[in-house]
Image (cartoon, grey):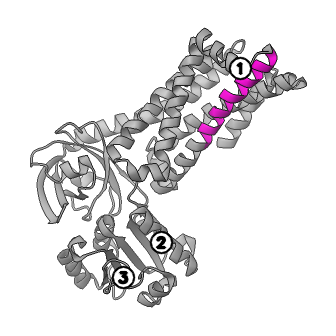
Amino acid sequence: MLIGNALLIVGMWVRHGGVEQLGSISGMVTAAGQVTALLGTYLALVQLVLMSRSPWLDQVIGTDRLMVWHRWTGFACLWLLLGHAVFSTVGWSLGDGSSVLDETVSLLLTYPYVLMATVGLGMFIAVAVSSVRAARRRLSYETWFGIHLYAYLAIALAFLHEVLVGTDFIDDRLAVWYWVALYVVAIGLLLTFRVGQPIVFSWRHRLRVANVVQEAPGIASIYLTGRRLDDLAVRAGQFFQFRFLSGGGWWRHHPYSISAAPNGQFLRLTVKGVGDDSHWATQLRPGVRVFAEGPYGAFTGARIGRSKALLIAGGIGITPLRAMLEELPPGPNAVTLLYRASSWDGIVFRAELETLAQARGASIRYLVGRRGSPEMPFDPLQPGPLAQLVPDILDRDVFFCGSDSFMDRVESSLRSLKVPGAQIHAERFSF
């Protein structure tokens, strides 16, 4: 369907006489500008659909994979739109016999919708730059989220530019309605699942903060109560987007996994105070109302195809795995948990984990210490040490969660050990 729509868009461009421009250099460059504009705008709408949080997409594809597709589609969209700006300006300048600089100034000063689109392109560039991994490491979630909101305004500006001055729409009402339909579908999914569904969910369940428990330095568990929690279609390993309706950051949502298996009485999430809002969340008071979206994610026991599972946690990545340990089928050696932390202060839920392990026949190995230190002279998650820790790793489904660097190391080791891709399940704590 994705490729089919792209071919249809190019087909409409051909129907509107696009091929007829290819008889000159200026025409070919201008034609390239038209095609890149159409495909770049289409990919912008695809991005909206990918991040609409449609339950069907979430369950079939998985949140992690959707985020990867969204990121790379975004970069492709930006390059196409940049190509449109460059090709169109150069093509028109060749046709007019003017310099590229003069053509650029003329377009910006003469056509307000070109200026509008240029502003939108600048917003797309800002969003793309903030999505580069090096930039994400330096930005707080709150800053990153604020920058990404400008993508919606950029898409709106692109739509006005496209419909009002796009050559594909001047004499073709069918093309206009086709593009309007694409926008309606994309925005409709977005409004349904990111606005309508959360409003209904929050009205139905009326979540509030019941208690906040300090688990470790800078880490706290937040207990939420509400109505009809036994009706929640949530599984251990999934997460919600939470907004705490108190303080200045109430309008920003934050993804937090539940850290205890669903029980119909409360939801528990465990937060590490690394950003402005997450630090503030660890200081919440009982009674604060909570607006929630979800549940999301396919990182659940439903993906198990083997009789045994290996859980690998890095730091605060223990939260969804602790819930899964409570929900996975019990049995001798059925579940093994490897818990990596730089210090014992970073170990969360130790008493709970050991109680659960004893009751369910699971085994736990704590891998504590900084790499290169006397207590941890080597990386225990490298292929060799990992195979020694879990000799039957090829017979297990592997679930792992933690920071980006942690996830990269674990995934690389699993691939080196020839663990089949169908047995590898990941949840990244990143944005």
Q: Quadrant of residue 115?
A: top right
Q: Which residue is mark 3?
A: 336
Give me the residue at 19% from left, 50% from top. 281
Amino acid type of the residue that numbered disc 1 sits on in the rendered structure: Asp
Q: Which residues are magenta?
A: 76-95
At 50% from the left edge and 71% from the top edge, which residue is drawn? 411
How far, Cα to Cα, is label 3 from label 2?
19 Å
Q: Residue at x 41, y 78 (%)?
A: 309
The answer to whether residue 266 is magenta is no
In the rendered view, would you say 418 is above or below 273?
below
Q: Position of residue 327 (x, y in %)?
A: 31, 70
The residue indicated by pointer 2 is: 409
User: What separation in Å lies between label 1 and label 3 (alpha carbons)?
Assistant: 59 Å
Residue 281 appears in the picture as rendered: yes
Q: Of the residues under marks 3 and 2, which one precedes in the sequence?
A: 3
| Mark 3 crowdedness (10 Å alpha carbons): few <14, some 14-19, many ≥20 | many
Single out the mark in the foreground, 1 or 2.
2
In depth, the one of 220 and 109 nearer the eye is: 109
Residue 431 appears in view: no
Residue 197 x %, y %: 35, 38
Q: Is residue 350 above or below residue 172?
A: below
| In the foreground, 54 or 105 | 105
In magenta segment, residue 93: yes
Classify residue 332 as left or right of residue 81: left
Q: Which mark is residue 168?
A: 1
